[in-house]
Amino acid sequence: MGAASRIAVAVTGAVTTIVIARLLGAEGTGGFAVALTILYVLTVFTTLGMEHGIAYYVSAGGWQAAHAFAASQRLALALGAGGAVLGVAARVAFPSAFGGLTVAESALAAGALPFALSWYYASFVALADDHYEGYVLPPALQSGVLMVLGVALVIPFGLTGAVIALAASHVLGAAAAFASGRRRLGGAGRGAPAPGQLRRALAFGSKAYAANALQALNYRVDLFILSTVASTATLGHYAVAVAVTTVIWLLPQALSDVLFPRVAALSASGEGSAEEQRAFVEAKSLRHTTLVVASSTVIVALALLFLVVPVYGADFEGSIGLGLIRLPGVALIGLSGVLFATVVGRGFPQYGLYTTLVVTPITMALYAVLIPSLEATGAALASSLSFALSFGLAWFFYRRVTGRRVLPLLVPTASEFADYRMLGPKIAEWAAGLLRSTRGT
């Protein structure tokens, strides 16, 4: 289900990007990439790690889902409003770093933040409560609405129309997720909330939050730095290379998201059988991720070589080499997500923070040296090296926490291929259950 959601997001996002590239060219693509990055960076920096606290404590039985839902929605409103103001202030203070976006366009992108946080938190409550439909549908809905509205508005209003569609998609996604959560969980839950639950969740998530915030710099600050030294068209070429290569992350991220609360629940059990099951789940997750990343890397490499120009247009031929430079690092960071999902699920979020504390200054130095001299090529090379370093540290901390050697767990066995033969019936079973539920509703 998570994979289906990620694929839906990838397909609808690709259609949106292609339409913008065809209608607005490389410059419009670069501007829209900056708008997306504004919202992404603000979201990462304002979550405070709440999603990790929700997933950990709700899945372990320490926080009622209804109480977590209500508390997180109030937090989304407060953090989102404050973060949106900071985003607009940054645009006013550093206009050259925003790829030609006007203050109004930047404000539209930043103003979507409360709604983005709302559906994001709601989806993690659903995930921790084993309500997977509530986890996978909001991002797919948001991306689908963005595609429809983006195509409709970019023709008459250009880049501004695309940014309006971005904001509206998060508003509608938040409304749908909020309505679904209230209907499923009710108003208040059983009894009064225990004091300090929100604070405890934030305390747990703060370590992972700091790691995510620093990682966001590693992932996205290259766009802002590049926009200050290169043309908007060059920024557009790099944005397409980023969009195509990050497709590799879709399935590993879906598996990581589901793996984290499962490991947390098994860790909280403390029973011998739970320990055996946890080791089994962790090993399976790594082997399947290896299969997915290896096959995805080959597919993306072929797409870069043979599909970028026919799909995006001849103006984007420069994206091919940039994507191939990023490809090895992107593949390695896909594996890192599952390694860290296990580490955090076992109750060690500080190791993610340690990793980013090491990686971030090195990454910033690489960006500072390579981007001014090599522009987009330097950004691609620096990001790929940064991702490779993150993977090496994820490997180290995984072994430290689990005591298991990583390399044997990256080699798929016959059992993993047998799992895929069972996947079809499982998908059919889920689809039938979802259809019955929809008819009942």
Image (spheres, rainbow, N blue to C red):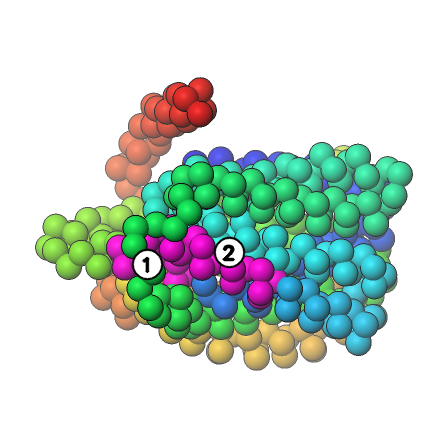
**In the rendered structure, which amino acid carries the disc numbered 1?**
Ala
Examine the image and state in which quarter residue 79 appears: bottom right
Horizontal and vertical percent position of residue 25: 85, 46
Report helix, strand or loop for mark 2.
helix
**In which quadrant of the rendered view does residue 404 lie?**
bottom left
Give the quadrant of the N terminus: top left
Residue visible at 39% across and 71% down in the picture: 199
Question: For mark 1, what is the residue?
Answer: 192
**Point 54% across, 69% down: residue:** 213
Q: Is residue 79 in sight in this rendering?
A: yes
Q: Is residue 62 left or right of residue 386?
A: left
Q: CA distance from mark 1 to mark 2?
A: 17 Å
Residue 386 in sight in this render: no
Question: Which residue is tagged 2?
Answer: 73
Closer to the chain start, of discs 1 and 2, is 2
Residue in front for this viewpoint, 440 or 386: 440
